Image (spheres, rainbow, N blue to C red):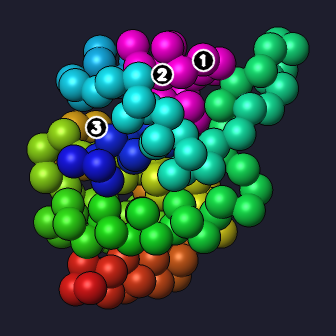
Amino acid sequence: MKTRRHAKILELISERDIDTQDELLRCLRESGFEVTQATVSRDIKELRLVKTLSSEGKYKYSVGQDHTKNVSSKFFSLFADSVLTVDSANNMVVIRCMTGMAQAICAAMDSIQWKSALGTVAGDDTIFVVCRDDTSAKEMEEELKKLMTR
């Protein structure tokens, strides 16, 4: 549950300008997570979130630059626990997940910035990754399949 919640937090702060713990708490509750203020505070500390200046001149939570390695390990754990299949066609990789997990995995995947991925789209149980070319898609498919066996 903690891994899913952390992935959801990463997803939320990548989609919205969240500037307070109360706002993050409200967003998590709206997403179906029953959490307390103390839990959110611990999560912020564990994820090493920092406040950065948004384009509107307000501060918001974001992932610190030195946090990539920690996010990577969370992504790998979440991926191994939740992904059912990985396949590719042309320059696209299709990742099938357990119901409700695609957006969390996609947000974690986006935060580690795969060089060969041009963009991602997540539904409820499926992620589409558009790669630079067919070769990149095939390589990504092979890498992701290895993560499923960890």
Q: Residue at x 25, y 78 (%)?
A: 148
Image-based side of 109 in relation to 88, left or right: right
Image coords of residue 59 (percent x, y): 77, 21
Rate crowding at label 2 as few (under 14), some (14 to 19) or many (20 or more) other CA atoms within 10 Å: many
The residue labelled by disc 3 is 123
Q: SS of the residue at dot 2?
A: helix
Q: Residue at x 49, y 33 (%)?
A: 41
Which numbered mark, 2 or 3, is in the foreground of this view? Answer: 2
Which numbered mark, 1 or 3, is in the foreground of this view? Answer: 1
Circle 3: residue type: Gly
Q: Residues at badges 1 and 2 in contact (C-beta under 8 Å)?
A: yes
The answer to whether residue 38 is seen in the rendering is yes
Circle 2: residue type: Leu
Q: SS of the residue at dot 3?
A: loop
Instruction: Determine the image quadrant of residue 138.
Output: bottom left
Q: Is residue 126 above or below residue 67?
A: above
The residue labelled by disc 2 is 24
Name the residue nearer the viewer: 20 or 150. 20
Which tag, 1 or 3, sits closer to the chain's start?
1
Alpha carbon distance from label 2 to label 3 = 22 Å
Q: Which mark is residue 20?
A: 1
Q: Residue at x 50, y 14 (%)?
A: 23
Q: Residues at badges 1 and 3 in contact (C-beta under 8 Å)?
A: no
Image-based side of 119 in relation to 93, left or right: right
Q: Which residues are magenta?
A: 11-26
Which tag, 2 or 3, sits closer to the chain's start?
2
Circle 1: residue type: Thr
Q: Is residue 146 above or below residue 133?
A: below
Image coords of residue 84 (percent x, y): 14, 66
Alpha carbon distance from label 1 to label 2 = 6 Å
